[in-house]
Image (spheres, rainbow, N blue to C red):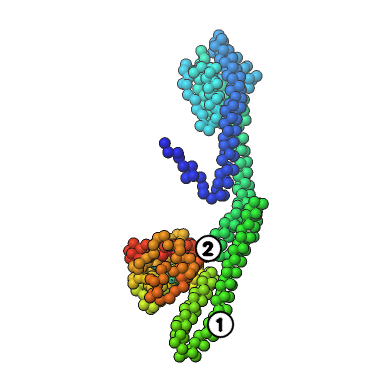
Amino acid sequence: MARPDLKLYVPHSLLPRAILIVIVPLIALQMIVAFVFVQRHFEGVTRQMTRNIARELAVAQQVIDTSPSTAIAQLRLINLSEPLAIQLTLTPGDAVENVHLRRWIDLSGRALITEMEALLGTSLAIDLVANDREVDARLLTEKGILRAVIPRSRVTASNPHQLLVLMAVASTVLSIIAIAFLRNQMRPILQLAEASDAFGKGRSVPFRPAGADEVRRAGSAFLAMRTRIERAIEQRTLMLSGVSHDLRTPLTRMKLTLAMADDLPEATAMAGDVDDMEKMLNGFLAFARGDGQEEIAEVDLVELVEDIATQARRAGINIETQCYNDTRQDPVMPLRVDAVRRAVQNLITNAGRYGNQVRVCLRFTRRSAFFTVEDDGPGIPEDRYEEVMRPFTRLDEARNQDKGGGVGLGLAIAQDIARSHGGALELGESEILGGLKCTLRIPR
Ligand SMILES: Nc1ncnc2c1ncn2[C@@H]1O[C@H](COP(=O)(O)OP(=O)(O)OP(=O)(O)O)[C@@H](O)[C@H]1O
Ligand SMILES: [Mg+2]
């Protein structure tokens, strides 16, 4: 038999779980205490008290039965009523219907009725409903029906509901206090989760460790990690752009010299090399700018995709677009628009370079946005997906030569931009066009 999966019934977030941990034992304790108290103590006391009263009624019954006449029985009853403090009357009649009236909530009433019946037999009617504070009992005797009205306080211990109500009120107050404390303890954990989530998506939100020691430690560790990563990124950017920038000056000088030495046969070849180097440097700079200082802003993704496609068409690429929205909201989300535009453009440039037909598809879901670029080119063998995404990697030079120059940074930049938004770049084979399919995922 399959084991029932408890996880389905347990709440997912921390606060409801903690509340459950506090409240379940509280309710269990209440139920045990209530049960033991009502069952053992309260019913026990009621039984003892009822037994005594029932004996007194049995005496009254015997007094009536042993009286020579009804009139004498009436007289004797009056004499008995006083010391017993029970209102006793004798009315004519020769049958008592065995009915017991009690409210369902009247827990001690049940014990009272069983105990009375055990001692006085079944020719007995008991009414606990007509008056809350009295027990109205009718009992068959030889000379008629004996009616006894007994104050309820003489048969039942004082109200048991008081204790239950008290316990319910006390535990409600306790729960409210516990929940208030728990919420306070939970807040720093939530803040830490939000800060890490934002950082994963490339945003740095203000965060200060707070709360219990353990949470504070996690918060400080996160802050130290964030600072280290930010510094590393900054260094990389600085280094790359510094090197590229510094190399540009001598390159420009070389170009000038070559332009003047026009008549040398080697000059044309060298000019081509210099052009290549310049292109590489521009690639370096673009890579370094990957997670540049661009601000995050709300962007309409459909507009963005259409805009990129229009530009690509102008560059002579045969491109078609398609947009799917799986949510009911507008496809708007916060991102670094120039960076994402560059990433998608890189994918489209590749597709246009290696294929003739290009398809760009946007899918907007509750959690992420997916940009898919497909083409009808030769594609990439599956075992080289990782390799081509590394910087400066180009697949077989022979294939690339006539396709125009590249430095092998396009995919690396796209992947870098996806990662800095907390997403990823995935390669695959296009089912529709047969070439490469690149999927850029950006979480919301
Ligand atoms: N759509 C594609 N179809 C087939 N091969 C591709 C496709 N896109 C990329 N590749 C292969 O992956 C390699 C790496 O691509 P990447 O975009 O990183 O560099 P590049 O296009 O050669 O140069 P850059 O983009 O820097 O100008 C390419 O050289 C090419 O061999
Ligand atoms: Mg490229």
Compared with residue 322, is residue 267 higher up or lower down, i.e. above or below? below
Q: Is any atom of residue 167 visible in this view?
A: yes
Residue found at the very far front of the displayed protein: 265
Label drawn at residue 104: none
Ligand 1 occupies quarter:
bottom left
Count of number-bearing discs? 2
Q: Amino acid at mark 2?
A: Lys
Q: Residue at x 56, y 9 (%)?
A: 66
Q: Residue at x 56, y 72 (%)?
A: 240
Q: Is any atom of residue 441 visible in this view?
A: no
Residue 294 place in picture, x, y as percent: 54, 72
Read off the residue under disc 1: 249
Compared with residue 257, is residue 359 higher up or lower down, i.e. above or below? above
Read off the residue under disc 2: 201
Q: Tag 2 or tag 1, which sits nearer the N-term?
A: 2
Q: Quadrant of residue 224?
A: bottom right
Q: Identify which residue, 59 or 15, lies in the foreground.
A: 15
